[in-house]
Amino acid sequence: MNEVNPFETAQRQLDKAADVLDLDHSVHQALREPMRTFIVNFQVEMDDGSTKTFKGYRVQYNDALGPTKGGLRFHPDETLDTVKALAAWMTWKTAVADIPYGGGKGGVVCDPTELSESELERISRAYVCAVSDFIGPEKDIPAPDVYTTSQTMAWMMDEFSKIKGVNAPDVITGKPIGIGGSLGRGDATARGVIYTIREAAKELGMNLDGARVAVQGYGNVGFHAHKLAEEQLGAKVVAIGDAEGAIYSDDGLKHKKISNNMKEHGVFAKDIEGTEFLGDGDKGNAELLELPVDILIPAAIENVLTAKNADHVRAEVLAEAANGPTTPEADEILYENGVYIIPDFLCNAGGVTVSYFEWVQNRNRYYWSKSEVYERLDKKMTKAFADVHERAREEDVDNRTAAYMVSIEKVAEAMKLRGWV
């Protein structure tokens, strides 16, 4: 499922929008590659007394609109191309959401499932030591991502503060509330997804009460998207999937029931009463993607929708909660089939938006209530959706190309005003 190079996908998506925009060649070429790429190797003492060398990445894609911003992953299969793609998408994500940031991303090649908490802490601190000259509140602001948590961010913020000799909560977002984290950050990405689905339904004349939803990927975003789809939209989630496989119920899968089961068993089990097991791992998730639902929410990894399965997608709305779940070939098929796509860097921009809110609160040392955070997030996401939807209609292009057009124009204008091109 991951044979496609994600950075090549990001470049092809950019090229398509640049062609429609008739973008200046020099600007186009500048935007096809990251401005700065850092590869670091650092040593960490393991619990058994041995020393192991780890490889880390940090990509600062473009900072014309402000300091770069983006998550940091711990993953055994992390690659530079993946980090570059994610940094590119972050550039467009912050621009489409009208946030004064550029795009960045980072990663450490490691398997967190095989590491103790103390080893994870030492890796976190060592990585920050390795990149401390290249990050900062006005340079590049990391955040949690795959296999990193608020605790990871706490260790990193503390280490950076020690190195610089200042208290610097604004160097990193996604921190615990007790040391400067923002209320409302935990479900911000999923909440942004729900806001954009709500807006799409208005434009399509879709009744969301009882609408059938499938969620592929059941980490933080998928978990909260399930909960909020029920609570905020009145929708019925009929299928969920994760690395273990996928389950289905025509009557709907109640979030509370699934959540309680997870507390008991660690992951949702295939023998939950009243559910049908669609299959283990990739097989089950492949089945889920082709179910007859109104809304499909891919919330896991890249490239799950390809030329091989796009023609079998039966959803009316595809809400891309994950980064890069759809290949360019699949995009064309889905567009031709009339599937309304809410593109990833619009759909999942709620997380970086509330990360921006956290940074603003850290800078001002003044903190907002949860209701204030949600209200501001709703306004941002609603405006971003409207900008993209209207552009797509004006230019008669698909939503992803429209989102790129909106974002690229903002970045290109900033580059020209600053005299870069």
Image (cartoon, grey):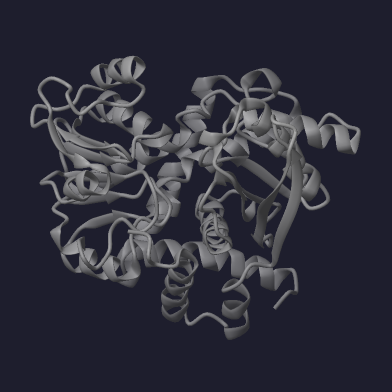
Task: Locate residue 367: give its quadrant.
Answer: top right
Kindly identify the residue that appears in the image at 14 percent across and 27 percent down: 252
Tell me: 78 left or right of 403: right
- Among all residues in the image, which is located at the extreme right? 165
Q: Is residue 322 left or right of residue 74?
A: left
Instruction: Provide residue 325's location: percent of width, then percent of height.
Output: 36, 55
Q: Above or below — where is 151 with respect to 348? A: above
Q: Quadrant of the N terminus?
A: bottom left
Please name the residue shown 80% across and 43% down the image.
Answer: 129
Q: In this view, does 371 lie above or below 242?
A: above
Q: Residue at x 20, y 38 (%)?
A: 213
**x, y (%) of residue 12?**
43, 74
Q: Is residue 118 toward the left or the right of residue 285 in the image?
A: right
Q: Quadrant of residue 324?
A: bottom left
User: How many numbered circles are shown?
Assistant: 0
Q: Which image quadrant: the C terminus? A: bottom right
Residue 27 position (above or below residue 177): below
Residue 187 drawn at (x, y percent): 45, 29
Does residue 169 appear in this view? no
Say if residue 127 shows up in the picture. Answer: yes
Q: From the viewer's perspective, tell me whether residue 265 is left or right of residue 294.
A: right
Where in the figure is residue 203, as x and y percent of width and height?
24, 49
